[in-house]
Amino acid sequence: MTDSLRYPIGKFNFGAPADAKNIPAWIKDIQQLPEQINDLIKYWSPEKFRAVYRPDGWTSAQVIHHLADSHANAYIRFKLALTENVPTVKPYDETAWAALPDGSEHDPTASLKIIEGIHERWTTCLENMSDTDFEKRFFHPGLKSELALTQNLALYSWHSRHHLGHLKIIANH
């Protein structure tokens, strides 16, 4: 398996500084993801939702379900960090979630609605955050470190483009 299939836009670098000058572009990535997915998949057949982007990878439907799960968690982590002092967030097993019936079914309609709603609210939240808000943090026990919301926004901008890349691989085959 090639890294270009697993990481179509490259790996996220947690060690890289999250430069605040990139915040508007990262917010735009969050805002545009639902429309980008819908534009990409609007004419897909049911078979296309069962296709995988790489051997042993998720189906396109699982990628969409995962985006709903992951971005719901991310949005909640933002709200926790904005309203609490360095809260500890709960990690989850994304592979186990993807294997559950609601995460492995081939009709992504419900998850697309979740993504649309979360991204609309998340964008509103992001657009109204101050510079100080972006420096607020949460503790992630799986990473054993605190993450500033600036870095978490950079991560989810990448995550959006990363999985959109997977869907584009499927679209092109």
Image (cartoon, helix red, strand yellow):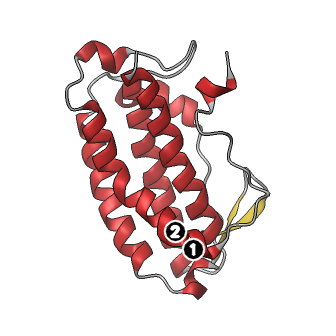
Of helix, strand and loop, which one carries label 1?
Answer: helix
- Residue at figure coordinates x 54%, y 40% from the top left: 162
* Residues under numbered marks 1 and 2 in contact, where contact means CB atoms less than 8 Å apart: yes
Q: Which mark is residue 81?
A: 1
Of helix, strand and loop, which one carries label 2?
Answer: helix
- Residue at figure coordinates x 67%, y 71% from the top left: 19
Indicate left or right for 15 with 44 as reference. Answer: right
- Residue at figure coordinates x 43%, y 53% from the top left: 72
Asked whether the viewer can see residue 104, the reply is no
Reply above or below: 154 against 40: below
Please state which amino acid type lies under the numbered disc 1: Ala
Count of numbered badges drawn on the protein: 2
Reply above or below: 91 against 126: above
The residue closer to the viewer here, 13 or 97, is 13
The residue closer to the viewer here, 80 or 27, is 27
The C terminus: image quadrant: top left
Counting from the top left corner in percent of width and height, residue 26 is at 51, 63
Counting from the top left corner in percent of width and height, residue 82 is at 53, 78
Residue extending farthest to the left is 43
- Residue at figure coordinates x 64%, y 79% from the top left: 135
Indicate left or right for 35 with 123 as reference. Answer: left
The N terminus: image quadrant: top right
Q: CA distance from mark 1 to mark 2?
A: 5 Å
Reply above or below: 110 against 6: below
Q: Which residue is mark 2?
A: 78
Indicate left or right for 124 with 80 as reference. Answer: left
Please state which amino acid type lies under the numbered disc 2: Phe
Indicate left or right for 106 with 99 as reference. Answer: left
Counting from the top left corner in percent of width and height, residue 32 is at 35, 55
Specify the quadrant of the image occupied by residue 100.
Answer: top left
Q: Which mark is residue 4?
A: none
